[in-house]
Amino acid sequence: MIPSPTLPKRLLEYRNRWQSAENPLISFPIATYNREDILITRTLPSIMHQSYQNIEVVIVGDASGYVE
């Protein structure tokens, strides 16, 4: 595995510990545009309730109009 310079050391250690041929890391890339309501109430809970535990969720907001 090639280390990613953008990931903190602690996260890399966690990823390396759980990633193996028997327990591969499954990624859920989610592209969203002004839909935080569905993301929080439906999408993320659905992913978190899966029985498989070695997952990562990558959420990418594409030019959202939300401003804090």
Image (cartoon, grey):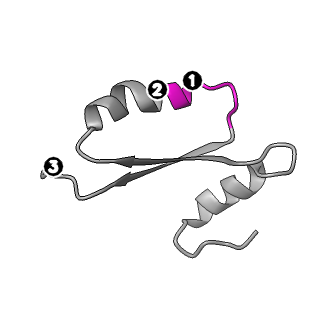
The kind of residue on which mark 1 rests is His
Could you tell me which secondary element the residue under label 3 belongs to?
A: loop
Q: Which residues are magenta?
A: 46-53
Q: Mark 2 or mark 3, which is nearer the start of the sequence?
A: 2
Q: Regarding mark 1 in the picture, which secondary structure is present there?
A: loop
Whether the magenta-drawn stretch holds residue 50 is answered as yes
In the picture, measured across the screen, residue 5 lies left or right of residue 34, that is right
What residue does disc 1 label? Answer: 49
Determine which residue is flagged by label 3: 66
Q: Seen in the image, is 27 located left or right of residue 37?
A: right
Residue at (62, 26) in percent of width and height: 50
Comparing 2 with 60, the one in front is 60
Image spot of residue 16 (x, y percent): 74, 58
The crowding category of the residue bearing disc 2, from other C-alpha atoms within 10 Å (few below 14, some 14 to 19, many at least 20), is few
- SS class, disc 2: helix
Cβ atoms under marks 2 and 1 closer than 8 Å: yes
Residue 42 is drawn in which quadrant?
top left
